[in-house]
Image (cartoon, rainbow, N blue to C red):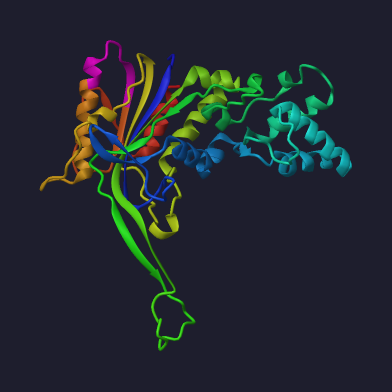
């Protein structure tokens, strides 16, 4: 089977929370279908995916690091471990940083965060020390998460990596209802008999409770090209799928404990045809009824739109797998219903 893309659609309900904040410390939002929606940015979701425990565990390697502090936190310790003295290690790391990032400022920090796995970074600096003019071409394979999410270095375009995955901003399936929390913090040592015996601190913060539609797709040919290893690419997609399930953004998690995984998942293995984002199922917002809540209403709209989209598409050569925990039966034509997310992942991976 020749696979073009692997696609993932998720429905996920969060309780009162602020999982992804904007510059005003409010939950991110947007307008979709002429209605205000709650939103989780794709960047936030991608970070949650790559940092999920299951990603590194499944792919069998640590994730890459994005930082401006590569000189002091990675390069100098590596060179010291090679037996170089501190002055030589720092001089070499500085020269490497300037050459790699075209960064001439007198600082230990790079002007942008560099995104490298340890193996690739250390192989690069080893090649740099040889004096070979083509040292960048001697880099090792990129890390699995770099292969998935890509890398852009304006000053070192020959080290750029085309992203194999595309991750959409998650949006609420329904109209946003934003709420305000008024909170106080007591001063435990304040004498309650004092004139100002009120709270030691007070403030307000916004939150919402929403059902989100999430969508992502991965190009298998691009992933295999980035990794130069078809078997590793297969493991990488498995890791991506598993991590997507537990990818819960950590915004204000201590105050909201929003550990609610997706309740519906649709996995797609596509041989031919364009990837299909099903967000237009919610151009008209989902609404709860007396008979069903937003979970069922959102799932019904999603499945109905899937059926309509497949009829509309001129080419739709793909396998579909559905898992959910809803109290209703869902079995659209051409979609295999499986008992849980783990079986869904297995079905997808076995077709790669």
Quarter assignment of residue 195: bottom left
Observer-nearest of 303 and 2: 303
Observer-nearest of 103 and 83: 103
Observer-nearest of 37 and 340: 37
Question: Which residue reaches farthest front?
Answer: 195
Q: Which residue is drawn at 17% across and 42% down?
A: 287
Q: In this view, does 149 lie to the left or right of 326?
A: right
Q: In this view, does 60 lie to the left or right of 274?
A: right
The correct choice, above or below, for 53 with respect to 158 in the image is below
Q: Does the segment drawn in magenta span residue 14?
A: no
User: Percent position (x, y) of residue 34?
Assistant: 23, 33
Residue 126 visible in the current orientation: yes
Q: Residue at x 37, y 47 (%)?
A: 27
User: Percent position (x, y) of residue 251?
Assistant: 44, 50
User: Percent position (x, y) of residue 245?
Assistant: 41, 40
Check the picture and name the quadrant holding the N terminus: top left
The correct choice, above or below, for 327 with respect to 323 in the image is below
Q: Residue at x 42, y 20 (%)?
A: 5
The correct choice, above or below, for 187 with respect to 92 in the image is below
Check the picture and name the quadrant holding the C terminus: top left
Question: Which residue reaches farthest bottom?
Answer: 193
Question: Which residue reaches farthest left?
Answer: 290
Q: Give the range drawn in magenta.
A: 309-320
User: Percent position (x, y) of residue 73?
Assistant: 72, 44
Q: Residue at x 28, y 35 (%)?
A: 31
The correct choice, above or below, for 214 with respect to 204 in the image is above
Number of marks? 0
Residue 84 visible in the current orientation: no
Q: In this view, does 56 lie to the left or right of 259?
A: right
């Amino acid at each position: 089977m020749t696979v073009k893309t692997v696609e993932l659609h998720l429905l996920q309900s969060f309780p009162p929370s602020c999982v992804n904040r904007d510059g005003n410390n409010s939950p991110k939002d947007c307008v979709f279908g002429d209605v205000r929606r709650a939103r989780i940015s794709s960047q936030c979701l991608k970070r949650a995916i790559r940092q999920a425990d299951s990603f590194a565990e499944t792919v069998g390697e640590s994730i890459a690091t994005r930082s401006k502090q590569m000189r002091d936190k990675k390069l100098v310790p590596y060179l010291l471990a090679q037996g170089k003295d501190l002055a030589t290690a720092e001089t070499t790391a500085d020269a490497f940083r300037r050459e790699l990032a075209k960064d001439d400022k007198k600082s230990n920090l790079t002007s942008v965060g560099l995104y490298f796995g340890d193996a690739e970074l250390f192989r690069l600096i080893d090649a740099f020390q040889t004096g070979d003019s083509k040292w960048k071409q001697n880099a090792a394979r990129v890390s699995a998460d770099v292969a998935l999410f890509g890398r852009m270095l304006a000053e070192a375009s020959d080290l750029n990596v085309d992203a194999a995955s595309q991750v959409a901003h998650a949006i609420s399936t329904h109209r946003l209802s934003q709420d305000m929390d008024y909170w106080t913090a007591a001063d435990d040592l304040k004498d309650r008999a004092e004139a100002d015996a009120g709270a030691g601190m007070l403030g307000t913060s916004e939150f919402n409770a929403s059902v989100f539609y999430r969508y992502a797709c991965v190009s298998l040919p691009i992933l295999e090209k980035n990794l130069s290893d078809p078997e590793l690419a297969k493991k990488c997609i498995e890791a991506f799928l598993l991590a997507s399930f537990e990818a819960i953004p950590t915004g204000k998690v201590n105050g909201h404990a929003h550990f609610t995984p997706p309740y519906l998942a649709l996995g797609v293995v596509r041989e031919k045809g364009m990837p299909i984002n099903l967000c237009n199922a919610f151009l008209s917002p989902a609404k709860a009824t007396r008979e069903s809540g937003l979970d069922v209403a959102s799932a019904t709209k999603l499945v109905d739109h899937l059926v309509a989209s497949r009829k509309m598409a001129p080419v739709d050569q793909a396998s579909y797998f559905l898992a959910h925990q809803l109290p209703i039966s869902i079995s659209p034509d051409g979609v295999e219903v499986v008992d849980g997310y783990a079986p869904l992942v297995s079905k997808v991976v076995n077709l790669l």
